[in-house]
Amino acid sequence: MVSTIRWVPGWVWLLLAGLAAAVTGWLHLETVTAEREAALADLRAARIENTALVATLEWRRQQAERKDAALAERTRALEAANDETATARAALTRLERDDAETADWSSTAVPEAVIAWVKKNIGSTAASSASQ
């Protein structure tokens, strides 16, 4: 075997070694290029997903702002209604205390038909308003 190796000139061995190194380098370059392309594809997909997530986040932020504004408006309306009710109750209390005729009227019994009518009409309106 050693004698066979000696028959082949040295430049041929160098040429074969160089060719093997070139093929190995070329294969490594192909592998690195494929990995780079895969990484770029992953990056593009991540950017697309990120864009979608940012759009979703912006939409959710707008929805939250709308809900906050609606709740603030509802709170203002509720406070106004509570203030109006308190004012009306205070006026009624003053009338009952200061006006003899109103005091007499408010101390009389309310007929059952009137109580039923108020419960039927006012109660159903209040219940439907509360459910909205």
Image: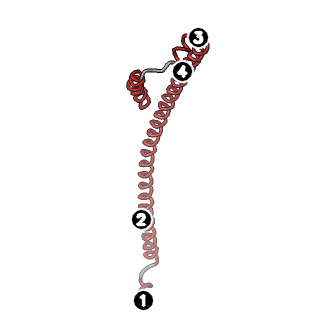
Identify the image's colour scheme: rainbow, by chain, secondary structure or one colour: secondary structure
Residue type, numbered disc 4: Thr
Tell me which label, 1 or 4, sits earlier in the chain.
Answer: 1
Check disc 3 and report the residue beneath it: 99
Residue 88 point in image, percent of width and height: 55, 17
Residue 31 point in image, percent of width and height: 42, 62
* Above or below 3: residue 67: above
Q: Secondary structure at mark 3?
A: loop
Tell me which label, 4 or 3, sits earlier in the chain.
Answer: 4
* Above or below 98: residue 75: below
* Above or below 70: residue 55: below
Write down the quadrant of residue 84 in the picture. top right
Check disc 1 and report the residue beneath it: 1
The residue mark sitting in front, 1 or 2, is 2
Residue type, numbered disc 1: Met
Residue type, numbered disc 2: Leu
The residue mark sitting in front, 4 or 2, is 4
Residue type, numbered disc 3: Asp
Residue 16 point in image, percent of width and height: 42, 73
The residue mark sitting in front, 1 or 4, is 4
Residue found 45% across the figure and 54% down from its top? 39
Compared across the picture, whether 83 is left or right of 10 comes to: right
Residue found 41% across the figure and 61% down from its top? 30
Q: Nearer the viewer, residue 105 or 61?
A: 105
Q: Nearer the viewer, residue 16 or 12?
A: 16
The residue mark sitting in front, 3 or 1, is 3
Check disc 4 and report the residue beneath it: 85
Tell me which label, 4 or 2, sits earlier in the chain.
Answer: 2
Q: Nearer the viewer, residue 82 or 123?
A: 123
Write down the quadrant of residue 113 in the picture. top left
